[in-house]
Image (spheres, helix red, strand yellow):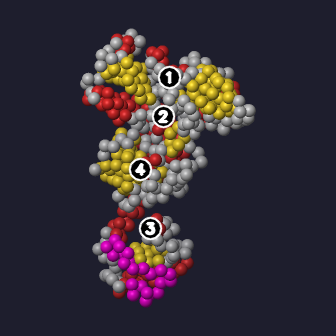
């Protein structure tokens, strides 16, 4: 079993950015990737909105550079798939198909995968003309005709990419004529492209073909009419679903399976972070995934440092420890600090005092269920042996110390 | 792994005896590249199976002729007959499971 400071699950842009920041902070860092690094970004050719890269940089090029960058700072990589995890507590265990690892902090960067339409013929004809990856499969369709389903940025960008190969690209759009979810600049390019045709107010009802795609049935939502369109391929870009099945029951997920996080990328479990497309967020792009990764790595570094300190100063002490929770913005707790300090100094032979500023660190207060301040816990051998909450008097503190 | 093209495909696959695994790939297909090291490793462990790869960029019609229109795709032939097919979202473990099943 190998131990690391930080283990990152998933090697897309979010995971790679986290790896760069964590490794550069001298944390021993491992990225576990089940396939090839780069994530979804490595399957897209067009990459023109990552700041600083607009002149022909491709998805695979950009993510390869991120991979080399992470390696440069000492981030380690392992090609394996996570099958189970134990996330609670200080030492987190990650079980993969081929091994077992422990980490102090875990960053989940498993991303998302293309959503399927769930229409008749889709599953049967996958790899037979039904595709979710234009760069993988566009070459098959040189001088042929294809249908694209979807109208967001990904769908329209990939449709434009496909016009370099296919003779005709028909985009099936659920909205009224002229309405696309894609951003304006991409819309304008699509409308100006002679190879692109639109079918409005419509959805795909069925994909037909005997061993290979031959036609699609398109239903007009306004009229209810179903028409058949002959085609050689169907490219589906209707959003994504997060890869979080393996996390069910281990941490909180939202109703769609995404991981809700704080601004620091913290999940519902201490020391576990989520970054990139797998996270509940507004904008899923390479640049936001990379930003998430940087934040999570710095937050994880701080977490590890604080927890290690707490273990050393409180949990692993043989002498009892008075653990005081206070905040500079809480009057009563501020008033209690000198009282507690004075009593602790007078009893320095019997106990140590550790003060937790809850403004800076709420995690430990939460863990001990401290809701009111000031609060003082007596910790012996890592266990809580007594408590005083509310206004602190010398007498109540002396009584607590006598109980040792 | 044996490199296939339209010159040798019939002889090496369709007219060959025993099991032949054909990996349909393209230099533009990242998931295909991810599979390659695993396939090479499997080739070492299954010497009775002929491992071959076909670059669809140079052999598009040949691939479509085998009804392959998406990557990555792995077809396994026995005595020239297609007996197994894996397409798009599969892992190297799935390839090995198929090989085990077919060579049993």
Residue at image point 44% right, 67% down = A367
Residue at image point 43% right, 32% down = B31
Tell me the CA gap for discs 1 and 4: 48 Å
Residue at image point 52% right, 55% down = A261
Q: What kind of element bears circle 4? A: helix
Which of marks 4 and 1 precedes in the sequence? 4
**Looking at the image, is mark 2 or mark 4 nearer the viewer?**
2
**Looking at the image, is mark 3 or mark 2 nearer the viewer?**
3
Mark 2 chain? A
Q: Position of residue A353 (x, y in %)?
A: 39, 76
Mark 4 chain? A
**Vertical order, A332 against A18 (above or below):** below
Q: Position of residue A355 (x, y in %)?
A: 43, 73
Q: Which residue is mark 2?
A: A42
Q: Which residue is mark 1?
A: A211
**Looking at the image, is mark 1 or mark 4 nearer the viewer?**
1
Q: What kind of element bears circle 2? A: helix
Tell me the CA gap for discs 3 and 4: 25 Å
């Amino acid at each position: 079993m190998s131990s690391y400071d930080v283990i990152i699950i998933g090697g897309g842009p979010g995971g790679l950015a986290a790896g760069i920041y964590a490794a550069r902070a001298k944390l021993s860092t491992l990225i576990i990737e089940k396939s090839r690094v780069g994530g979804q970004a490595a399957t897209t050719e067009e990459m023109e909105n990552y700041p600083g890269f607009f002149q022909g940089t491709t998805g695979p090029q950009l993510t390869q550079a991120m991979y080399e960058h992470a390696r440069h700072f000492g981030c380690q990589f392992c090609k394996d798939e996570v099958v189970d995890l134990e996330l609670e507590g200080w030492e987190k265990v990650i079980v993969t198909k081929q091994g077992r690892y422990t980490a102090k902090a875990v960053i989940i960067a498993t991303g998302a995968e293309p959503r399927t339409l769930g229409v008749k013929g889709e599953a049967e004809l996958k790899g037979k003309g039904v595709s979710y990856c234009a760069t993988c499969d566009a070459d098959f369709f040189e001088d042929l005709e294809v249908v694209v389903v979807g109208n967001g940025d990904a769908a329209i960008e990939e449709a434009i990419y496909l016009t370099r190969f296919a003779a005709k690209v028909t985009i099936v759009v659920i909205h009224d004529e002229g309405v696309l979810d894609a951003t304006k600049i991409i819309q304008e390019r699509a409308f100006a492209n002679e190879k692109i045709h639109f079918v409005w107010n419509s959805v795909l009802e069925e994909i037909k073909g005997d061993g290979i795609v031959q036609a699609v049935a398109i239903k007009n939502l306004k009229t209810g009419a179903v028409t058949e369109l002959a085609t050689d391929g169907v490219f589906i870009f209707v959003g994504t679903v997060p890869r979080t099945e393996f996390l069910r029951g281990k941490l909180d997920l939202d109703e769609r399976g995404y991981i809700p996080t704080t601004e620091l990328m913290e999940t519902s479990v201490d020391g576990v972070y989520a970054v990139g497309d797998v996270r509940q967020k507004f904008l899923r792009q390479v640049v936001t995934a990379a930003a998430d990764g940087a934040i999570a790595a710095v937050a994880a570094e701080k977490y590890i440092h604080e927890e290690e300190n707490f273990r050393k100063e409180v949990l692993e002490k043989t002498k009892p420890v008075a653990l005081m929770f206070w905040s500079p913005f809480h009057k009563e707790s501020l008033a209690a600090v000198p009282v507690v300090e004075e009593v602790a100094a007078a009893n320095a032979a019997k106990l140590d005092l550790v003060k937790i500023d809850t403004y800076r660190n709420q995690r430990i207060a939460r863990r001990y269920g401290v809701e009111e301040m000031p609060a003082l816990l007596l910790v012996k051998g890592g266990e809580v042996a007594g408590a005083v909450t509310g206004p602190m008097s010398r007498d109540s503190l002396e009584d607590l110390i006598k109980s040792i | 792994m044996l490199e296939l093209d339209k010159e040798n495909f019939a002889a090496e696959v369709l007219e060959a005896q025993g099991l032949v695994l054909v990996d349909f790939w393209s230099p533009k297909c990242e998931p295909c590249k991810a599979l390659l090291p695993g396939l090479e490793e499997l080739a070492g462990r299954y010497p009775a199976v002929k491992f071959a790869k076909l670059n669809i960029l140079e052999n598009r019609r040949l691939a479509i002729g085998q009804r392959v229109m998406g990557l990555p795709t792995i077809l396994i032939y026995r005595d020239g007959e297609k007996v197994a097919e894996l397409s798009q979202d599969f892992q190297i473990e799935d390839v090995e499971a198929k090989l085990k099943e077919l060579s049993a």
